[in-house]
Amino acid sequence: MSRLKENLVGMRTIIRREFTRVLRIWVQTIVPPAITMTLYFIIFGSLIGRRIGEMGGHDYMSYIAPGLIMMSIITNSYSNVASSFFGAKFGRHIEELLVSPLPNQYILIGYVMGGVLRGLLVGAVVTGVALFFTDLDVKHPLITLSTVLLTAIVFSLGGFINAVFSRKFDDISIVPTFILTPLTYLGGVFYSIELLPEFWESLSRANPILYMVNAFRFGILGSSDIGIGTAYAIIIGFVVALYSFSLYLMNRGVGMRT
């Protein structure tokens, strides 16, 4: 029991350090997403949305709000762990953690929870911004919260894997730029896949972000292009797969040095 308590103390220390880092540089971690999402709401919601009218049975501003909130959670959860863990590798202080008695799974969970907390914090700020433009009447609170938490975990783990294989600071921007951003924009944030031709609709269903955005939209608006059971199965599957792979990399010592 004392050993478990020591491990939990070590894990909480990592989480506290990560969250303190986010708050210390809040001008870089919290303000930019808030400004970016405000511009999205103004340009896409107010200006373009007036011409579009309704989408999926809801006014366009309400329709895109869950997607924009989820977009901010995804990008910030990912970038927090990618930059923080690579910084630890670059600064050589990750070696101190690896030789400590703290098991690898606690180190991994500590970094992941740091990313989750940043994602949730930025998501809350963006939700506050959204409320200036539209009303969000949450239909299914449990689905909303669980989707946010699971999605933040998925992309925190993705950021960890990115950091493990990165050898220089430029490497941690490759995946967000060339993979994450296109998948996010094509994940049903701004449109319903029912509007797409059959081929492109089928292709869109291969995008995991589509399921996360739609599960979150279902939690808030009560409507979705995807079955909620299917969405949960895919999200949980990614959590298990990415956690297992991340822990495997740590246990093997893959990419732990720059």
Image (cartoon, grey):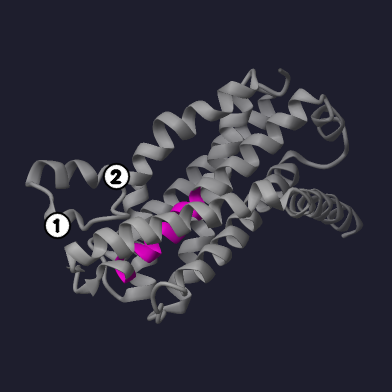
Q: Is residue 58 above or below residue 82?
A: below
> Which quadrant would the N terminus be assigned to in this image?
bottom right
Can you give x and y, in whole percent of width and height, for residue 167 in the image? 64, 18
User: Looking at this rendering, what residue extends furthest in the front direction?
Assistant: 47
Distance in Å between CA atoms under marks 1 and 2? 13 Å
Check the image and report above or below for 89 versus 30. above
Q: Which residue is mark 2?
A: 186
In the rendered view, does 105 fall on the left or right side of 99? Answer: left
Say which residue appears at 30% left-offset and 76% top-offset. Answer: 222
Viewer-closest of 125 and 174? 125
Q: Are marks 1 and 2 in contact (CB under 8 Å)?
A: no
Q: Is residue 117 magenta?
A: no
Q: Is residue 142 above or below residue 11?
A: below
Nearest the camera: 26 or 226?
Answer: 26
- Binning the other alpha carbons within 10 Å of mark 2 as few (below 14), some (14 to 19) or many (20 upward) gives some
The quadrant of the image that shows the C terminus is top right
Q: Is residue 33 above or below residue 241?
A: below
Q: Amino acid at mark 1?
A: Glu
Percent x, y for residue 12? 80, 55
- Image coordinates of residue 116 in percent, x first then y, are 61, 54
Residue visible at 18% across and 63% down in the picture: 51
What kind of element bears circle 2? loop
Residue under the point 75% across and 26% down: 89
Q: Nearer the viewer, residue 194 or 254?
A: 194
User: Mark 1 — residue?
Assistant: 194
> Under tag 1, what secondary structure?
helix
Q: Is residue 226 visible?
A: no
* Residue interval drawn in magenta: 62-74
Label for residue 77? Answer: none
The kind of residue tagged 2 is Leu
Quadrant in which residue 220 is drawn: bottom left
